[in-house]
Image (cartoon, rainbow, N blue to C red):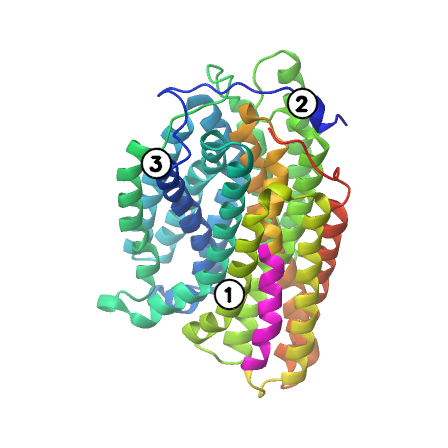
């Protein structure tokens, strides 16, 4: 692997002149693109609390409501790399605006769905729209800011991702409980529409246009089809496999995905050797910090995204809390996450592999104490005892998400910013989606095996064991990166 110092500097092309200044205009543009990140991650998690209401209103079966949740994640994950490349080629602001417009329309379509089949299709469209919008965010940040300011912006981006995941449960529960105009679960999708309208109006004026240095190259359509199909098959098979008891078709999907990934690698190498602008720049993987950080990101999001899933199951089904009450418990994670993220942002320029590695270890300790506490409480003890360990878990998340994002993207050259962010976003969303599948594979059999009144606390605690292992593995992986990566 080559060292970060040997990576050549990049030249960004701009359609509308230089990036916005690092003052109020840049902060306004940053706020606009971070809203897009927030709502896309929010919609990944918010649907979990709406499942009972959707099932009752649309008379949907369990497999159908699972597709309402999984369809978004599969489309989102599968399209992120292609979305990032489209930003490199045709303009990041342009693709961000287009993606947000389509996301807004798909959200309205979800809210108006009169049967579950239409809702599933609309959710897939919503996920695909998010895949076009989200990877542009980090590329835009990379062109608006440099040095320490960019490090802080990347850390704020990580803060937004975590808060969206944490507060998704609370916001969803509050909206469904409020039942505004009798719309029930439909409000969780309708809320996106006014937010998108405001952001679209501001984005056209405040967000600078930029593209990669190879912006004139055509899209690698073959590569896009191969990688989208491979990622879609992997995530869909793992998410749906558990609920169907791992039938033959799941393994067939995974085998086909492996073949498609092998073909993708061969295709990318040939296209890069011919100088034809591959969908993914192979040189990115020769940067040690980027490659190591990407693996650590997958491991970390396997542990983080799945935790929200099993905690919601434990609180709502095992402890009979309402969606709103469950969301209030989640606020403990949010408080810890917010506090440690603010501290991380202040020291963003001093991030090293060792400081990042401390975050997943803190999260592992938080999970371990949470599991021990839940087991001791059973089904009758006060859930207030869970707040301190959940606060600790939130601290670990805040110490990890932003700094890890900063470490990975700081190692990528700006000319491949959107492609690098597409890979990072894929690692994040794919890790979260697969983590939920793994957690379900552990949780539900443990629930059945317990056979007692305390089966939910037992299943919750058992499920946290692999999550703790993922955290420790993420920490160890980060330490394989150089002590301090060069910033581009």
Question: To which residue does mark 3 refer?
Answer: 25
Q: Tell me the distance, in whole angstroms, between the alpha carbons under discs 2 and 3.
A: 31 Å
Q: Residue 413: horizontal and vertical position, in percent? A: 59, 26
Q: Give the range drawn in magenta.
A: 383-398
* Residue 27 visible in this rendered orientation of the protein: yes
Question: To which residue does mark 2 refer?
Answer: 7
Neighbor class of circle 1 (other Cα within 10 Å; few <14, some 14-19, many 20+) is some
Image height of 164 relative to 264, above or below: below
Neighbor class of circle 2 (other Cα within 10 Å; few <14, some 14-19, many 20+) is some
Q: Residue 379: horizontal and vertical position, in percent? A: 59, 85
| Dot 2: element | loop
* Residues at marks 1 and 3 touching, judged by CB atoms closer than 8 Å: no
Q: In the rendering, which numbered label is found on residue 335?
A: 1
Which mark's residue is nearer the viewer, 1 or 3? Answer: 3
Magenta span: chief secondary structure:
helix
Which mark's residue is nearer the viewer, 2 or 3? Answer: 3
| Sequence order check, earlier mark of 1 and 3 | 3
* Residue 436 visible in this rendered orientation of the protein: no
Image height of 42 relative to 486, above or below: below
Image height of 307 relative to 322, above or below: above
| Dot 3: element | helix
Which residue appears at 61% of the width and 65% of the height? 393
Q: Quadrant of the C terminus?
A: top right
Q: Which quadrant of the view contains residue 309? A: bottom right
Image height of 187 relative to 120, above or below: below
């Amino acid at each position: 692997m080559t060292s970060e110092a040997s990576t050549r500097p990049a030249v960004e092309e701009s359609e509308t002149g230089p990036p916005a200044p690092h003052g109020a205009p840049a902060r306004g543009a940053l706020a606009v693109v971070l809203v897009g990140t927030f709502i896309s991650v929010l919609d990944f998690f918010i649907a979990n609390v709406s499942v009972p209401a959707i099932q009752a209103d649309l008379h949907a079966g369990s497999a159908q409501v699972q597709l309402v949740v999984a369809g978004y994640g599969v489309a989102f994950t599968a399209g992120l790399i292609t979305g990032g490349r489209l930003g490199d080629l045709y303009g990041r602001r342009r693709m961000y605006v287009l993606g947000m417009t389509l996301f807004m329309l798909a959200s309205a379509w979800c809210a108006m769905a009169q049967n579950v089949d239409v809702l599933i299709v609309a959710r897939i469209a919503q996920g695909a729209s998010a895949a076009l919008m989200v990877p542009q965010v980090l590329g835009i940040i990379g062109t608006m800011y440099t040095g320490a300011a960019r490090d802080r912006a990347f850390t704020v981006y990580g803060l937004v991702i975590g808060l969206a995941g944490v507060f998704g449960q609370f916001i969803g529960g509050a909206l469904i409980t409020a039942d505004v105009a009798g719309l029930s679960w439909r409000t969780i999708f309708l809320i996106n529409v006014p937010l998108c309208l405001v952001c679209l109006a501001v984005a056209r004026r405040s967000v600078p246009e930029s593209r990669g240095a190879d912006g004139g190259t055509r899209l690698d359509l073959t590569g896009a089809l191969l990688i989208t199909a491979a990622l879609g098959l992997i995530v869909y098979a793992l998410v749906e496999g558990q609920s169907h008891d791992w039938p033959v078709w799941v393994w067939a999907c995974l085998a086909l995905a492996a073949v498609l990934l092998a073909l993708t690698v061969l295709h990318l190498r040939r296209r890069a050797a011919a100088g034809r602008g591959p969908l993914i720049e192979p040189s990115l993987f020769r940067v040690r910090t980027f490659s190591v950080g990407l693996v650590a990101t997958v491991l970390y999001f396997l542990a983080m995204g799945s935790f929200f899933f099993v905690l919601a199951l434990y609180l709502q089904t095992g402890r009979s809390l309402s969606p709103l009450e469950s969301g209030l418990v989640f606020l403990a994670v949010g408080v810890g996450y917010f506090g440690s993220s603010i501290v991380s942002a202040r020291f963003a320029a001093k991030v090293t592999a060792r400081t990042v590695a401390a975050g997943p270890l803190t999260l592992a300790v938080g999970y371990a104490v949470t599991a021990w506490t839940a087991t001791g409480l059973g089904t009758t003890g006060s859930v207030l005892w869970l707040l301190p360990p959940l606060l600790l878990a939130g601290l670990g998340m805040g110490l990890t998400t932003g700094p890890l994002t900063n470490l990975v993207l700081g190692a990528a050259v700006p000319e491949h910013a959107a492609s690098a962010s597409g890979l990072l976003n894929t690692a994040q969303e794919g890790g979260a989606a697969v983590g939920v599948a793994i957690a379900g594979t552990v949780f539900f059999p443990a629930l059945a095996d317990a056979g007692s009144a305390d089966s939910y606390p037992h299943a919750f605690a058992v499920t946290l064991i692999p999550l703790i292992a993922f955290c420790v593995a993420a920490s160890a992986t980060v330490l394989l990166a150089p002590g301090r990566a060069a910033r581009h």
